[in-house]
Image (cartoon, rainbow, N blue to C red):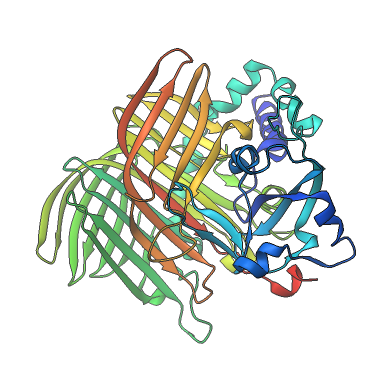
């Protein structure tokens, strides 16, 4: 009976997720306000090219949160307006995010004619009698979503960590150490250190974007440090995959890197040893919380990937487990003339593609905030892990994605034009409203790992962040720090998008 109930929960979770959770950022939903007469002049044309394109060289588009302020500021008193809903590939090289003086968020601009096939919906966009604009109503199913699920059911979904099987996660971990599973995954650790510095350490056993003319498979190790003075140090080593040795409890590149696990399914004690001429260190990581997986079983079936992220039909499964959602890290590091003892808070995740990246076109945005006793991480619009002190308030999918948003994004990294550097993450828990804010002007790029395709990138930034908590009558503003990760391996198919 228990197994049957578990299957039922998983089915309902998948259904609710498919209906309400935003797709990964492999595509951008943007908007454009236009006069009806101007739009109709292009009724029989394949592309839309407003006068601003020839004048400025681009078409100014709008994110969802930019629509209303723009309408109020620029279109007051105008009639016969239309609102175009546009879906663009985030890898489209003509889509660029530009900084503009006086604007906190980057602005999406399209540097070319806009194919009509990108326009998914055209709706009348009129001001009310009081002169103010309002967005067209969402489809009825979306408006009914909050009423479709009883509060008790939602609570069950939002705390599915309580009935997750940590023994299963432990077995996934054992599998992750062994060939051939180890070859298509990643190991990711981040540290918020007590002295104000921060660190990211990752190992990818198979180079995701290995040059086509490279016959021997490569592994990638990267470590990045931001000192308390704000100085960023980065080191990357690309090594032959054949040098990788694995066992049920560890993997290593002899003489260079060791990632070892000891303990039980609920006590995931890790030790990492790094030994390169440029940088060396020892990191001891001990958990304070049990493992958590964004997907209840630790694995998302390929069919759900197809529904949620648009990957090809028949795609293999995808594994993601935070073996250590919160822990204490200690140790030491020696990097050129920088030497320090390590003490602080750590996070560790393991993910496995079960296929090569080029066969899984997708993107994601991930974040991790720590400050004033709070530990929060997740993927905006999808899942969230909300911890206050030792109490886990929420750990699971957010069923109503409109209440879990990423807004006012900035793309200001000098390393890559499409590396996310800041934004506001908004969500709710019971009667509390939360806003996490990372400013792109104060974040620093720790990792930027581009491919030969300039629109593919994996990277992480870190910087001071704020957590705003409001119960409707009082508001608290807390300081902290946040990692923000971008990954896009979608390959832009120009022929497909210009049909």
Q: Residue furthest right?
A: 44
Q: Residue furthest front?
A: 77
Camera-side residue: 86 or 305? Answer: 86
* Residue 179 appears in the rendering: no
Q: Which residue is depicted at the point 42% across and 75% down?
A: 218
Expressed as whole percent of the image width and height from the top left, the position of residue 52 reads 66, 62
Expressed as whole percent of the image width and height from the top left, the position of residue 417 reads 47, 64
The quarter of the picture where residue 492 lies is: bottom right
Q: Which residue is depicted at the point 52% across and 25% down?
A: 428
Camera-side residue: 290 or 445? Answer: 445
Look at the image and tell me in which quarter the C terminus lies.
bottom right
Q: Which residue is depicted at the point 37% across and 38% down?
A: 369
Q: Which residue is depicted at the point 60% across and 40% down?
A: 73
Expressed as whole percent of the image width and height from the top left, the position of residue 10 reads 66, 34
* Residue 322 appears in the rendering: yes
Camera-side residue: 32 or 50? Answer: 50
Decide if residue 82 is on the left or right side of residue 263. right
Camera-side residue: 438 or 309? Answer: 438
Expressed as whole percent of the image width and height from the top left, the position of residue 231 reads 21, 57
Decide if residue 152 is on the left or right side of residue 364. right
Look at the image and tell me in which quarter the N terminus lies.
top right
Q: In the picture shown, does residue 37 fall above or below 77?
A: below
């Amino acid at each position: 009976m228990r197994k049957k109930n578990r299957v039922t929960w998983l089915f309902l979770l998948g259904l609710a997720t498919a209906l309400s959770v935003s797709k990964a950022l492999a595509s951008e939903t943007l908007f454009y306000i236009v006069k009806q007469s101007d739009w109709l002049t292009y009724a029989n044309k394949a592309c839309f090219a407003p006068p601003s394109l020839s004048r400025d060289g681009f078409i100014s588009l709008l994110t969802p949160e930019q629509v209303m302020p723009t309408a109020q500021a620029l279109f007051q008193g105008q009639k016969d307006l239309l609102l175009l809903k546009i879906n663009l590939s985030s890898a489209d090289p003509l889509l660029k995010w530009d900084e503009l003086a006086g604007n906190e968020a980057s602005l999406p601009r399209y540097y070319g004619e806009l194919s009509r096939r990108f326009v998914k919906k055209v709706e009348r966009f009129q001001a009310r009698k009081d002169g103010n604009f309002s967005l067209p109503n969402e489809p009825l199913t979306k408006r009914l979503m909050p009423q479709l699920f009883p509060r008790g059911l939602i609570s069950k979904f939002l705390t599915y960590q309580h009935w997750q099987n940590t023994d299963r996660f432990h077995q996934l971990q054992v599998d992750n150490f062994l060939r051939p599973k180890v070859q298509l995954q990643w190991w990711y650790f981040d540290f918020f250190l007590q002295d104000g510095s921060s660190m990211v350490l990752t190992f990818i056993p198979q180079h995701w974007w290995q040059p086509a003319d490279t016959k021997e498979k490569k592994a990638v190790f990267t470590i990045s440090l931001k000192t308390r003075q704000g100085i960023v140090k980065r080191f990357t080593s690309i090594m032959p995959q054949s040098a990788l040795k694995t066992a049920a409890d560890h993997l290593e590149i002899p003489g260079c890197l060791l990632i070892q696990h000891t303990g039980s399914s609920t006590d995931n004690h890790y030790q990492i040893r790094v030994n390169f001429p440029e940088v060396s260190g020892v990191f001891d990581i001990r958990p304070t919380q049990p493992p958590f997986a964004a997907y209840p079983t630790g694995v998302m079936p390929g069919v759900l990937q197809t529904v949620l992220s648009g990957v090809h039909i028949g795609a293999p499964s995808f594994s993601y487990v935070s073996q250590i959602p919160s822990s204490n890290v200690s140790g030491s590091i020696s990097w050129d003339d920088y030497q320090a003892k390590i003490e602080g808070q750590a996070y560790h995740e393991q993910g496995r593609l079960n296929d090569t990246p080029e066969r899984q076109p997708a993107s994601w945005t991930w974040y991790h905030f720590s400050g004033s006793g709070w530990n929060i991480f997740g993927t905006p619009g999808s899942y969230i892990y909300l911890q206050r002190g030792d109490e886990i308030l929420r750990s699971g999918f957010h069923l109503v994605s409109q209440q879990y948003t990423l807004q006012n994004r900035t793309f200001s990294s000098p390393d890559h034009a499409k590396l996310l550097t800041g934004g506001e993450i908004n969500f709710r828990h019971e009667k509390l409203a939360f806003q996490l804010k990372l400013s792109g002007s104060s974040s620093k790029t720790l990792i930027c790992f581009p491919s030969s395709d300039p629109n593919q990138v994996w990277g992480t930034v870190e910087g001071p962040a704020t957590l705003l908590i409001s119960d409707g009558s009082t508001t608290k503003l807390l300081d902290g720090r946040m990692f923000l990760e971008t990954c896009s391996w979608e390959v832009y198919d120009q022929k497909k998008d210009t049909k």
